[in-house]
Image (spheres, coloured by chain):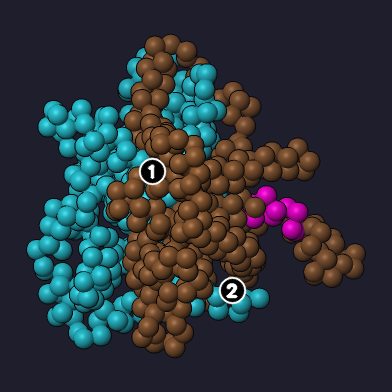
Amino acid sequence: MADATATLSRPLFGRRSGLRRLNTGTAFGVGLATLWLSLLVLIPLGAVVWRAQEDGLASFWDAATAPEAAAAIRLTVASALIVAVINAVLGTLIAWVLVRDDFRGKRVVDALIDLPFALPTIVAGLVLLTLYGVNSPVGIELAYTRAGVVVALLFVTLPFVVRTVQPVLLELDVEMEQAATSLGASKLTTFRRIVLPNLAPAISAGTALAFARAISEFGATVLISNNLPFKTQVASVYIFGQIEADNTVGAAAVATVLLLIAIVVLFGLDLLQRWAARHA
Amino acid sequence: MRFIALGYLAVLIGLPVVLIFWRTFEHGVKPVIDSLSDPAVLHAFRVTAIITFWTVLLNTVFGVGIAILLVRHTFPGRRMLNVLIDLPIAVSPVVVGLALILVYGKFAPVGGWLDDHGIQIIFSYPGMVLATMFVTLPLVVREVAPVLEEIGTEQEQAAHTLGANGFQTFRRVTLPAIRWGLAYGVVLTIARSLGEYGAIAVVSGRLIGQTQTATLVVDERFQNFDQTTAYAVAVTMAFVAIITLVLINVLRPKEHS
């Protein structure tokens, strides 16, 4: 899967590739694309932000800070942060093993990494509930707990860090590491000072994507959390409940908060990558 | 280190996959076949297939178009378009559903106008297709654009000097060159469309036998204690997911593998 966030910082005006025709054809294409994007993405998202403040900014603030809403947002962000950190570490580890190690069935394992992306989230949620639910065959009961939410999020965010780090690891020049080792550096030092700086942009990109995905996740968490307000209810489930209760202002308010968080994270990542590119 | 990685994967991915197949076929194959033969379930599969078909078709056409626009042309606002394409990644599916309802719902500006003319968006196919198109928007674009950049314009320019018009150039030069990137984007779109749940749950109204998709069936049957059917449909989708998984890994651009 192409790295969406990396594309954000890809210099568009650098390479002058392509036929440059500022003629009616291009204008028509741009017009069509703009219309398409507006009808599908911009206007609907704008409507969410609009609805959130339609009854006034005070009402927006009240809706966003209502006890149940605030609890849901706190739980969502906290879980997403935990999941992001775990993914940053384990994702890199898994990518390392897949690139540098060799064992029977490696290709199958490599393929399975994408399963959380190919599997419907509700199916993942059902499966996780079966595994860690009330009649758990492995004896671990996580249903209706925050740990259950974290496990569900770990499942759906698995591919992100792994798939952004893998290509970078593949292209990494092992000679630098070999030079470091021959000069007496321990494996840990080599990793810390040679490999990690090269991997850092990819790890942070994948982690940001995992975070953005984790705060938005709905299908995988809705079953295992059982939607207990104040305890295991994540923001997207709260929004869903508000829509069902026809409280679109409340839903829009929390949705806007989520959108803002996601934009901040992705924008911050873009800045980080541009800073890293300049200081590389 | 290998053991930590493999152990984590085995617990996180392996266990659930094994369990779902085991739990579904615990009582044999016949209950599964019976569940899947339920008219409502079959209808749900058909709904999912129709939505996926239209989403893939529309997003492929526009995806290729936008990719060509981004790579082969310059115009004011190109960078903004590039950023906006990625926006759907950051939006929660439930928010997508909410957004569409606020614009295309019966009591909303655009939706109300359309409703007066007999066109229903929300609680109907158009709304569900729109929702699925939203979440899959970047997929084709992000796979075709890099290929377009990589192949360069020499062949297209050559065709142009030999007298081919724009459409001929596209059909005979560009399209064959991007076909693997395009295929990969299409498979990703299919996988994502089949599995969409949150946005569909909001815009469809979840009307059983009418606007219920396969993913909605899993949830509804589970909530109504019909675990057999829920698992049966879930396993079917898991099976399809594994097939798309194989396709994804076969078609993945080589520099990623």
State the residue at coordinates (12%, 62%).
B40
State the residue at coordinates (59%, 23%).
A16
Quarter-of-image position of residue A85 = bottom right
What is the three-letter code of the residue carrying label 2?
Ala
Number of numbered discs = 2
Secondary structure mainly formed by the magenta segment: helix
* Disc sitting over residue B5 in the figure: 2
**What chain is tagged by disc 2?**
B
Quick one: quadrant of the C terminus of chain A? top right
Q: Colour of chain B?
A: cyan
Tag 2–tag 1 contact (CB < 8 Å): no
**Magenta-highlighted residues:** A195-203
Above or below: residue A249 compared with residue B103: below
- The x, y position of residue A135, in whole percent, is 36, 86
- The x, y position of residue B1, in whole percent, is 66, 76
* Disc sitting over residue A2 in the figure: none
Disc 2 to disc 1, C-alpha distance = 44 Å
Q: Colour of chain A?
A: brown
Above or below: residue B4 compared with residue A237: below
**What chain is tagged by disc 1?**
A
Q: Are marks 2 and 1 on the same chain?
A: no
* Disc sitting over residue A249 in the figure: 1
- The x, y position of residue A207, in whole percent, is 60, 55
Above or below: residue B39 compared with residue B114: below
